[in-house]
């Protein structure tokens, strides 16, 4: 019989709707990939009776129960005691967990607060799930017919603990047999409906493998679902479809997996050996920040200027003051001068620039909110592009979309270059 | 006794984690504003046994049960029948609902599909909740001690039906007269357990008003729950506690509501009239990007340099090359020179800098991953700080935490200044 799993999210800030729970959907998808179906999610507040009742109900109807949250050091963190009550046992201090918590504080050169001791308490008969990046160890315990894994609510800590501690225990305890893989191919540069119109044969109901399409922050992703007895078989089922998508959409394809524009750009920088610099006005450092979020980029990214004031454009990038006066800071002329200035001052192969109106204020009939000029400087000269994100969009979307378009322009420009040789 | 409510979200796409459920948090907040506490959320898939079991469990423990989803015309829409089974009654066709569905199709100039007839079926004894903007009427029925309101999953339809149909019935059935407010006070600069240790009297069970504490990305929030007969009374109940928190934590307090470090810094810039510039290495533009995410900041933020390469530190910020050679790019000396250079070149009152090892590569025993030096330059001179985020942390956390600490340092430095006069 198929394994039945249940997820319990814990926290008054969740049940009251103050915070959005992203852990439960993530865990559902992760379990789905292991072939484990989730039948229930429950969300409860920081109340002991609700903890015990929810744990007992889950212990009766599920084989595997994952809980998130409620393992902190404060008085409203009730999971350790709730598990003990549901299991009908007492709590004990786990010396290894205590040592791990103390070591974490020591590594951070901070004294361990007395309250954190409580995080080393475990129900009798439970096993601690080590947490290498936070103070809360998880708890692995059997109650009724179900195995419980209680994890912290902090998403990074939960995800690491799930992968390193829960999945191996799950594989040992239950024979996890079917393998489902989800491949994701990311595209950028055209709208979702445009892209889907050219892939209706693949996204049609009944197509094997199943293909879905989703858009997030202007990056479009095809998701291909493969299924088989082994990971290899599940993967093989997706191959032909993946090839068709790559073939049809060519330069729009950023890559496979959790790839976004910045990763794909850094991939092209690494392939070609080219270096890059940034000059930003309306995007305010977002181009730089997206690029430097990618590990190992320091060989290729030389630096950038956030020229938020006109004086900074003149002093730091060498944009002629007359150019700003004649055309305004938001103009193709200034975008070009910014990119050329950054390329020269940082000595990079390529430089990108962005100047525009991020809003909500500062728009005018000729230069509305959402209007952004991008610049691209290479050894071949400087080009500019006009981008309109739409005056109805919020500031963060205007900043993000225009930054992504600037990065993507540089990526596509590098696609044509040969491997290895940076042409200065 | 207080009314106890439960929310059940229905749909296999929710329980599998493919779609994020935003209805349940919205309903929780809407009920909270009416003074109705939500004790449970459950999410179930399109399975009849799970429907009946979840409805019966809710009928036992709640006074009011709101369900969303599962009212469509297709075979996996099981709520109508699930409610009938849980109530132990049959289904009947509701002529008014059928007429409303037919009229909706007529308005859209589309023929009504035969399958849509099923949407006019109601459990015996139930009342239809009209849906003026969709084909699925809702269902109002009593099962056990609880009133059930089953609504469509489409957010717009659900919200309209809740406001127009459910709230009036709720007011009629239960005397809803309490109002609940949630206030949030955000703090930065110390750990969650440290902060709670100084507020144990406030966060203790039984404290009126109820006070919770949560941490998100190193920002700590106190949540104060006030309750009263009017919004004013509910707010008044929180005042003394809010004052106590502000009094106890003084400079750690960022502000009230959805405030983070950047908003609070920009608030201090606006209050004092001071201007700021940034010089970033390991944070790669994140300080600039956080600051420029705040609307209206262009008066105060003059610009920044992302000096990712050593050459950029020398050329763009005037850091002496010998200083880098003698102490390394990750050193208090270079952090100080970066901040001083940015302050001078941008002509700002204040400048912040960050240089460190964001990882995952590039660490050494003396300069491990997670070590960051911050600099703060003002008219009084330059100071530096050593920050250790922890070598076990991922790159994005190291970048975010150190950027937030840099911004917060500038915020606290501005706190002491008088209103209005920027002292250059």
Image (cartoon, coloured by chain):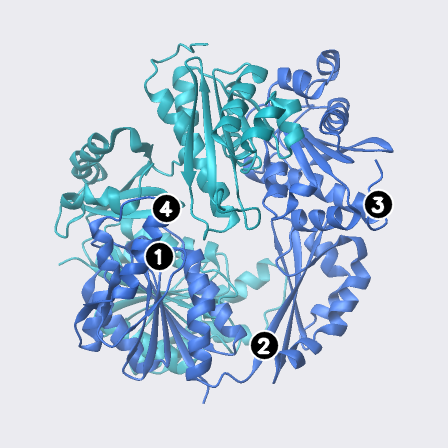
Chain colours: A blue, B cyan
Q: Nearer the viewer, residue B335 or B231?
A: B335
Question: The N terminus of chain A is located in which quarter?
Answer: bottom left
Number of the label disc, if any, that sits on residue A108:
4
What's the distance in space between the residues labelled 4 and 1, CA to CA? 55 Å
Chain of the residue that carries numbered disc 3 in the rendered image: A
Chain of the residue that carries numbered disc 4 in the rendered image: A
- Check the image and report above or below for B84 versus B303: below
Q: Nearer the viewer, residue B422 or B255?
A: B422
**Residue at 27% of width from left, 73% of height from top?**
A55
Q: Is residue A360 visible?
A: no
The quadrant where residue B306 appears: top right
**Residue at 47% of width from left, 37% of height from top?**
B372
Q: Circle 2 is placed at which residue position? A: A180
- Mark 4 and 2 residues: CB-CB less than 8 Å, in contact? no
Element type where label 4 sits in the image: loop
Nearer the N terminus, badge 3 or badge 2?
Answer: 2
Element type where label 3 sits in the image: loop
- Left or right of A418 on screen, residue A145: left
- Mark 1 and 2 residues: CB-CB less than 8 Å, in contact? no
What's the distance in space between the residues labelled 3 and 2, CA to CA? 41 Å
**Residue at 38% of width from left, 39% of height from top?**
B258
Mark closer to the observer (1, 2): 2
Number of the label disc, if any, that sits on residue B165:
1
Residue B220 is situated, as x and y percent measured from the top left of the image, at 32, 42
- Left or right of A114 on screen, residue A344: right
Number of the label disc, if any, that sits on residue B64:
none
What's the distance in space between the residues labelled 1 and 2, CA to CA? 43 Å
């Amino acid at each position: 019989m198929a394994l039945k799993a249940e997820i319990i999210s814990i926290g008054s800030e969740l049940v009251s709707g103050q915070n959005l729970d992203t852990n439960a959907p993530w865990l559902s998808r992760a379990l789905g990939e292991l072939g484990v179906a989730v039948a229930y999610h429950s969300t409860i507040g920081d109340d002991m009776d609700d903890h015990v009742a929810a744990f007992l109900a889950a212990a009766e109807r599920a084989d595997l129960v994952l809980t998130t949250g409620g393992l902190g050091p404060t008085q409203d963190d009730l999971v350790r005691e709730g598990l003990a009550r549901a299991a009908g046992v007492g709590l004990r201090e786990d010396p290894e967990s205590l040592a791990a918590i103390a070591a974490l504080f020591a590594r951070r050169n901070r004294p361990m607060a007395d309250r954190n001791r409580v995080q080393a308490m475990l129900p009798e008969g439970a096993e601690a799930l080590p947490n290498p990046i936070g103070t809360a160890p998880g708890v692995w315990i059997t109650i009724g017919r179900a195995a419980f894994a209680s994890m912290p609510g902090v998403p990074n800590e939960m995800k690491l603990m799930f992968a390193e501690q829960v999945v191996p225990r799950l594989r040992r305890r239950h024979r996890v047999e079917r393998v489902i893989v989800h491949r994701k191919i990311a595209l950028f540069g055209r709208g979702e409906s445009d892209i889907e119109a050219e892939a209706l044969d693949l996204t049609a109901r009944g197509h094997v493998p199943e293909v879905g399409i989703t858009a997030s922050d202007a990056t479009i992703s095809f998701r291909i679902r493969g299924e088989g007895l082994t990971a290899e078989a599940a993967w093989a089922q997706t191959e032909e479809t993946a090839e068709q998508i790559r073939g049809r959409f060519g330069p729009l394809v950023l890559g496979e997996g959790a790839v976004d524009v910045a990763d794909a750009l850094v991939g092209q920088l690494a392939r070609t050996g080219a270096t890059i610099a940034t000059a930003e006005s309306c995007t305010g450092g977002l181009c730089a920040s997206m690029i430097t979020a990618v590990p190992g980029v320091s060989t290729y990214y030389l630096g950038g200027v956030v020229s938020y004031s006109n004086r900074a454009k003149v002093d730091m990038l060498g944009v002629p003051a007359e150019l700003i006066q004649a055309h305004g800071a938001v103009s193709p002329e200034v975008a070009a001068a910014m990119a050329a200035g950054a390329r020269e001052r940082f000595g990079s192969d390529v430089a990108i620039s962005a100047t525009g109106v991020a809003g909500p204020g500062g728009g005018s009939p000729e230069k509305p909110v959402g209007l952004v000029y991008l610049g691209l400087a290479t050894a071949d000269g400087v080009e500019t592009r006009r981008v309109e994100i739409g005056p109805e969009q919020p500031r963060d979307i205007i900043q993000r979309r225009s930054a992504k378009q600037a990065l993507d322009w540089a990526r596509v420009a590098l696609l044509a270059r040969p491997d290895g040789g940076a042409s200065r």
